[in-house]
Amino acid sequence: MAKPIYTTHLGMVDILPDEVRKWQYLENLIRHEARLFHFEEIRTPIMEQTELIVRGIGQLTDIVSKEIFAFSRGDDNYVLRPELTAPVVRSYVENHLDQRGGSQKLYYIGPMFRAERPQKGRQRQFHQFGVEVIGSDDAVADVEVIAFMIHIYNKIGIKNTTLKLNSIGDPESRDSYKKALKEYLKPNYEELSDVSKKRFENNPLRILDSKEKEDQPFIKSAPVIGDFLNDESKAHFEKVKQYLTDLGISYEEDPYLVRGMDYYTKTAFELISPDLGAQDALAGGGRYDLLIEEIGGQPTPAVGFAAGMERLLIACEELGISLGDEKSVDVYVVTLGDAARKWGLTKLPEFRKNNISATMDYMGRSMKAQMKDANRENARYTLIVGDNELNEGKFTLRNMQESDESSLAFEEVKDRLRNQ
Ligand code: HAM
């Protein structure tokens, strides 16, 4: 085959029809379950203001410092959204969603963009589904969010997962932890990686999320934030754990889990799958009680998670979980000659009106080629039409599975297919 002139960008892939069917299956399932949890869908633009993402996620995070796709046009700075928490919060503030009353229970499914080095389970354009609950500081919200996340995987049949859980506390707890962390790291400052050196002064917590080799020995024996939580943060964390236990959701505490964005407060969690290889995080999230205020709204607590769709598909593949059916069509109209072709074209809408999926040959092929095509398209029935059939007003309906044929008037054909 000739090499194509144009290809997709690195780390960006086409989702072809046979794959799209699986995506639609998953998306339908997610939408259905979201409705059962009473989450409402929100859709925001693919591009946001760069400043929102920088402020929301944090200047010193990997996402902002290395991975955003950003450009300017006129006086505006655009960024392809790397995630949806900051954009959803922007939308909440801009559209005064607080005025709808109560807490806003929102979900989304859509593409995100991060200029990472592509590998299995890591792309530059990838897709997330996620949930943001804005307006509640109650541990019930944290636990409902986690329960929804796990429910989706269970429903699909992915049960072998580990929920990692931590609390990174409120600002007061974090301040005392930061001090302790700096004290601990100070004697080894020179041995830290360059990025961690940069983070040492203003954002030492980020060092715990470092993937650099030099930093690993220091991360392993660093003080843990759990020892620095104040009473309020501790009480919240205890409640989250208690409610999880009440719901029968098991978890593993991971005192070094800090996540990749600066907006987190208190609860932080990740869902890990042993079926994914190096990129083993199916989903992640947490509480972000300061973000709404940070980007100009009223102080409002919130919690959410996001999950990678591609990683979900990889896990299904690894586990042999089938997602939906093969392609198929109820009836393929096989036509012989111009009059039959015209008849077929005008009868297709009648099938569809009756909820019967229908197609025909678009390429003027022979009857044999049309039958072959009908097989390839997994047609359940073919309706064979030529001059004789048109004269007699009786058409040959062939059940492709059972290979039996009946000669029927068009109304009878419709009745037969409607009742299948
Ligand atoms: P995150 O951990 O950056 O969190 O992303 C969530 C999930 O998206 C990951 O666990 C992973 O499955 C998937 N993911 C991330 N990057 C890639 C990539 N390059 N290729 C493929 N999949 C990827 C967030 O985005 C937060 N906004 C989650 C959140 C919502 N926190 C509170 N609310």
Image (cartoon, rainbow, N blue to C red):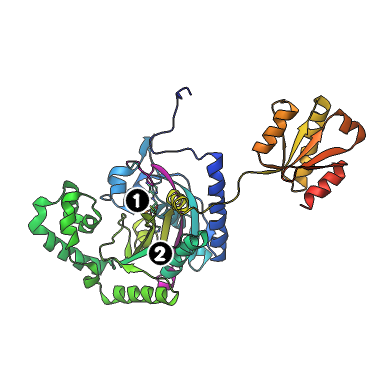
In the picture as drawn, the residue positioned furthest to the right comes out as 392
Question: The disc labelled 2 sits on which kind of residue?
Answer: Ala
Depth check: give the residue in front, 398 or 303: 398
Q: Is residue 161 left or right of residue 337?
A: left
For label 1, the SS is: loop
Question: Residue shown at 36%/44% (left/top)?
Answer: 50
2 and 366: which one is in front?
366
Residue 53 vertical position relative to residue 228 in the rendered view, above or below:
above
Beta carbon of the mark 2 residue lies under 8 A of ligand 1: yes
Position in image of residue 306 (x %, y %): 42, 56
Mark 1 Cβ and ligand 1 under 8 Å apart: yes
Residue 400 picture quarter: top right
Q: Percent position (x, y) of residue 324?
A: 58, 51
Q: Which of 102 and 417 is in front in this view?
A: 417
Residue occupied by mark 2: 302
**Judging from the image, what secondary structure is the residue with disc 2 in?**
strand
At x 19% / y 68%, what residue is drawn? Answer: 176
The segment highlighted magenta reads 117-141
Query: Residue 279: which numbered mark, if any?
Result: 1
